[in-house]
Image (cartoon, grey):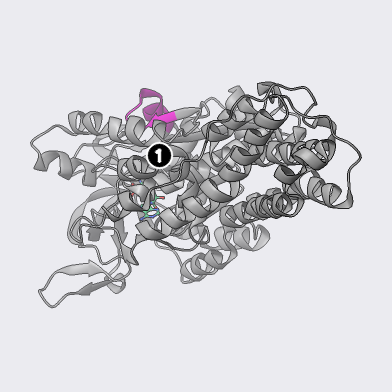
Amino acid sequence: MSKKGNFYITTAISYTNAAPHIGHAYEAIAADTKARFKRLDGFNVRFMTGTDDHGQKVMKSAEALGKTPQEFVDELLPEFKDNMTDALDISYDRFIRTTDKDHHEASQAIWKKMEENGDIYLDSYAGWYSTRDEAFYTEKEIETKPDGTKVSKETQTEVEWMEEESYFFKLSEYTDKLLKYYEEHPEFIQPDYRRNEIVSFVSQGLRDLSISRTSFDWGIPVPGNEKHVMYVWVDALTNYLTGLGYPNMDDDKMKDFWPCNTHLIGKDILRFHAVYWPAFLMSAGIELPKEIFAHGFLLHDGEKMSKSVGNVIAPSDLIGRYGVEASRYVLLREGTFGQDGDLTYPGMTTRINAELANNLGNLAQRTLSMINKNCDGKMPEPQAFTDADKALLKAAQEDMLPAVREHFEHMRFSRAMEEIMKVARDANSYIDEQAPWGLKKTDPKRMGTVLYVLAEVIRCLFIIMQPFTPKACNKLLDQLHVSPNARDFEFISAEHVVKAGWNIPKPEGVYPRIEVTEEAA
Ligand code: MSP
């Protein structure tokens, strides 16, 4: 059971209209890294991810292939679940699909709550709709291209005219309530600079929102009027509650994990999460999530990934090239989380080699090899520590975790990694200064102390690296003889140091070097 409290984190659920790319993987890895960090830091964590199977976009993609939407999403599921989420070691507690039965119940239940509260009425919608964005746009929000096509100004996706009977949600009545909420909860929309966008959008006044469709049926039926299916975003957002057992408010998951701590999403869908979702929840009388964190987009060679440009990187491309551990690391390392990040293959290769293979990997490999060879395969007994020993031990045992934790609180993954790399660099400088290889003949006891200090620093480093590269860390901690029960962050402390006499076998590398010849090929 948790000592520090409960923590619920979610990713956006991906549209199953086409195979995923590393933009989807990026979000899953970020949420997973945070979830793992919190678990290791003593929290009781629930983590949910999944797929958004409904909507016009999915339906049109299915039709284009002559398939039913259900067949189509079932066929695409392994691309998201097996080849991306599971392949990347994403430690979700539930992988939800909006076609799951309990999700139908939850969506209909929240609809009824909003209806009971007098926020839903029947009328007809006439306006623009972008299927790509699954979003409605006003006349002011669209523009006409030279070839006559109409597109959303903001997203440049094509819009079409739509006119049909529709249920509406009285979003206009939430303008002031939302503004007040943002004001009173400045931490609700993160990073801070994203809040201004939303505040200025809402300040212009909100219009009622069309929340049902009649021209197709791939969605969740509106309770009491089966001619309508819910607007895909009503059902999609509700997934965050379905996963906790909603509408059963007495479900233990609901009691433990709602309100959600973090909905992690991309910047393109902030409006849905920071405006529509809180309004729906207010209407249904449900507490609001604590934080909506919008991350930036991953670009490839400075460009948006798109099929037509041919620069899309699939999760399997990255895993094939770098392996799972390095792929997880490098996506979160390049750029500042929150802002757009630019990926290039040469840049990623250099980063992986410099930081994982050289800085951390070599440090562990060199140290464990020396212990194995020069200390009879046993952790040496340390003598009195010098100032240099003490300074390095303090950096690893005392200073690193609070600094990394602070960065994690604000999703600054790259800065957190930088703190860890700094300690590893200091340890490498320490090896060079102490030159333990030269001490074997002159002062073997001192050699033992130096190797002991290094082993202890490596223990702390690989415990704290677990959220980023879980398998590699476990493999290294096994080789270092650290008990599987002693790998939580509470063990990053002088009380749990490596012990003299532990068996240290001939080490095997955990962060392989990426051959640059392969890269060029
Ligand atoms: N189905 C909606 C979300 C519903 S959440 C209740 C959706 N799906 S999506 O498949 O288009 O996007 C899923 C997530 O991936 C979103 O958070 C989106 O911002 C993110 N990304 C899509 N492309 C991306 C990049 N190139 N880079 C980083 N993240 C990107 O929106």
In front of the other: 472 or 170: 472
Pinpoint residue 273: horizontal percent, then vertical percent.
47, 52
Pinpoint residue 278: horizontal percent, then vertical percent.
52, 50
In this view, 80 is above or below 521: above
In front of the other: 2 or 359: 359
Is the residue marked 1 within 8 Å of ligand 1, measured from its CB?
no
Q: Quadrant of the N terminus?
A: top right
Left or right of residue 278, residue 346 in this image: left
Q: Tell me the residue that label 1 is attached to.
A: 323
Is 395 magenta? The answer is no
Pinpoint residue 342: horizontal percent, then vertical percent.
40, 62
Left or right of residue 491, residue 322 in this image: left
Left or right of residue 1, residue 131 in this image: left
In the current view of this chain or complex, which residue is farthest to the left?
66
The region drawn magenta spans 95-106
Report if residue 485 is visible in the image.
yes
In the current view of this chain or complex, which residue is farthest to the bottom?
146
In the image, what residue type sits under mark 1?
Gly
Residue at 24%, 58% in the rendered image: 129
In the current view of this chain or complex, which residue is farthest to the right?
384
Number of numbered discs visible in the structure rendering: 1
Pinpoint residue 483: horizontal percent, then vertical percent.
69, 22
In front of the other: 267 or 220: 267
Report if residue 259 is visible in the image.
no
Under circle 1, the secondary element is helix
In this view, 68 is above or below 190: above
Category of crowding for the residue at label 1, using alpha-carbon neighbours closer than 10 angstroms: few (below 14), some (14–19), many (at least 20) = some
- Dividing the picture into quadrants, the one containing residue 372 is top right
In this view, 501 is above or below 434: above
In front of the other: 60 or 521: 521
Is 102 magenta? The answer is yes
